[in-house]
Structures are given as structure tokens and as C-alpha cells.
Image (cartoon, rainbow, N blue to C red):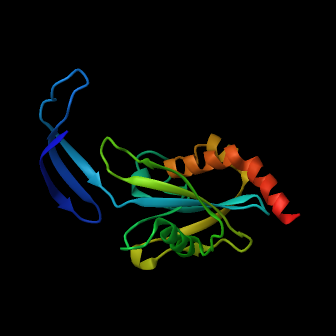
């Protein structure tokens, strides 16, 4: 492919780039010149904390402007997440910091899950997911960085309640769905391993 021109007509909390480009065709030759807008995001990461003793996951709830047109409420249940906006900070360190800021918890075992392009038709955003073991005994309450406008409520959700939440459409964002699907697929093996460690 060939980028003929790239500029950034908007730079705010997010950035929007405009590209003029062309690319090779499957049948051979080149495409016509195309203009595409690209929503530019810093790399992001999210984590699903699970307490093996209580068999609960931690989800957070917060207001999301992007949900205004698609659901009954713009308050969404999500996993803990953040963007890599501190130079030199690894995704693992960032997600541990976000777990403290957004939920007041400390993550112990941290396991990488798949990373994926969120919406490659119009954005360069890449999300890396993690699974973590955590003690959720005292998790709850309200959290978030006030200087970032965050107002976050913490929920401890028993694994037994996840299917009903999915059926009701209450968990409708990709990071949450992907992380919970991974946990559901690996749940029994994780519980067996946890029981062996406790024995």
C-alpha cells in the first residue's frame, strides 16, 4: 500500500487523521485513490480479576458516551482498563496501576490473554487483555481518578451469575465479552488448579 498524504485535522482528547492512500488489489494492479479517516488511539489494555476462593469476578460500572445511542442506559459494566499514556510503563505495570485506581485492588497472578484490533475499519486502537487472580474479599465501593472525570462503581459478580448477565445483554462491550468467554472456557481447569494449591 502507499500513503499519498496524511494529516491530522482534529487533535483533542483523541486524534483524527485523514489519509489519502491506495493499495494493491487481489486481482492485481492498484486501487483507485481512497480517502479514509482514522481514529487514532494509544494502545490500551484491560484485565479481568477473578477470586478463586469466592469464585467471583470484579467488574466496574461507569458512564460511557459511546453507549448513549445503543442501550437503555449509558452506564456500562466493564473490565478494568486503561491506555498506555505513561512513557516507559509496561502494559502489565499500567494495568496493575489501573486496578488500584479503578477498583482499589491488588492483582497477584497476571496472565496475558489475546490482543486484538478493536475496530480496524476506522481505528488503529489495539487492546491487550489480561486475566488476574485477586483477593476480592474487601472489593467494592466507588473509585476512579477525579482529575480524569472518573466515577466508577465496583461490582463483585459470582461466576454463576455471568450467563444471566450475558443473556440480558448487560455485558455488551468486546473486552468484557472476550475476557469472560476465556474465563468460562478455562474456569474448571482454573478451579482445579486453585484447589490443588490450597490442599
Tell which of 169 and 52 is nearer to you.
52
Q: Position of residue 187 (x, y in %)?
A: 73, 49
In screen coordinates, is 197 left or right of 15? right
Residue 166 to residue 54: above or below: above
Residue visible at 44% across and 54% down?
127
Name the quadrant of the C terminus: bottom right
Q: Quadrant of residue 142?
A: bottom right
Image label count: 0
| Residue at the front extreme, as displayed | 28
In screen coordinates, is 138 left or right of 130? right
Please indicate, yes or no, whether residue 173 appears anywhere in the rendered image: no
| Residue at the bottom extreme, as displayed | 147
Residue visible at 24% across and 65% down?
12
Please indicate, yes or no, whether residue 12 appears anywhere in the rendered image: yes
In screen coordinates, is 150 left or right of 176? left
Residue 47 to residue 181: above or below: below
Residue visible at 45% across and 69% down?
90
Name the quadrant of the N terminus: top left
Q: Position of residue 19 (x, y in %)?
A: 16, 47
Q: Position of residue 146 (x, y in %)?
A: 45, 78
Residue visible at 65% across and 66% down?
109
Q: Quadrant of residue 8?
A: bottom left
Q: Quadrant of residue 193?
A: bottom right
Residue 139 to residue 15: above or below: below
Amino acid at each position: 500500500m502507499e500513503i499519498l498524504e496524511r494529516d491530522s485535522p482534529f487533535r483533542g482528547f483523541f486524534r483524527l487523521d485523514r489519509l489519502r492512500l491506495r493499495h494493491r488489489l487481489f486481482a492485481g494492479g492498484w486501487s483507485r485513490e481512497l480517502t479514509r479517516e482514522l481514529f487514532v488511539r494509544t494502545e490500551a489494555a484491560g484485565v479481568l480479576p477473578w477470586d478463586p476462593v469466592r469464585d467471583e469476578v470484579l467488574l466496574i460500572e461507569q458512564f460511557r458516551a459511546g453507549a448513549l445511542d445503543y442501550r437503555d442506559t449509558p452506564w456500562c459494566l466493564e473490565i478494568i482498563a486503561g491506555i498506555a499514556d505513561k512513557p516507559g510503563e509496561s502494559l502489565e505495570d499500567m494495568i496493575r496501576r489501573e486496578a488500584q485506581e479503578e477498583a482499589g485492588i491488588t492483582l497477584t497472578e497476571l496472565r496475558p490473554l489475546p490482543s486484538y484490533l478493536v475496530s480496524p475499519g476506522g481505528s488503529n486502537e489495539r487492546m491487550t487483555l489480561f486475566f488476574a487472580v485477586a483477593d476480592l474479599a474487601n472489593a467494592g465501593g466507588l473509585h476512579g481518578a477525579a482529575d480524569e472525570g472518573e466515577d466508577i462503581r465496583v461490582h463483585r459478580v459470582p461466576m454463576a451469575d455471568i450467563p444471566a448477565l450475558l443473556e440480558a445483554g448487560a455485558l455488551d462491550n468486546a473486552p468484557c465479552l472476550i475476557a469472560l468467554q476465556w474465563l468460562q472456557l478455562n474456569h474448571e481447569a482454573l478451579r482445579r488448579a486453585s484447589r490443588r494449591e490450597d490442599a
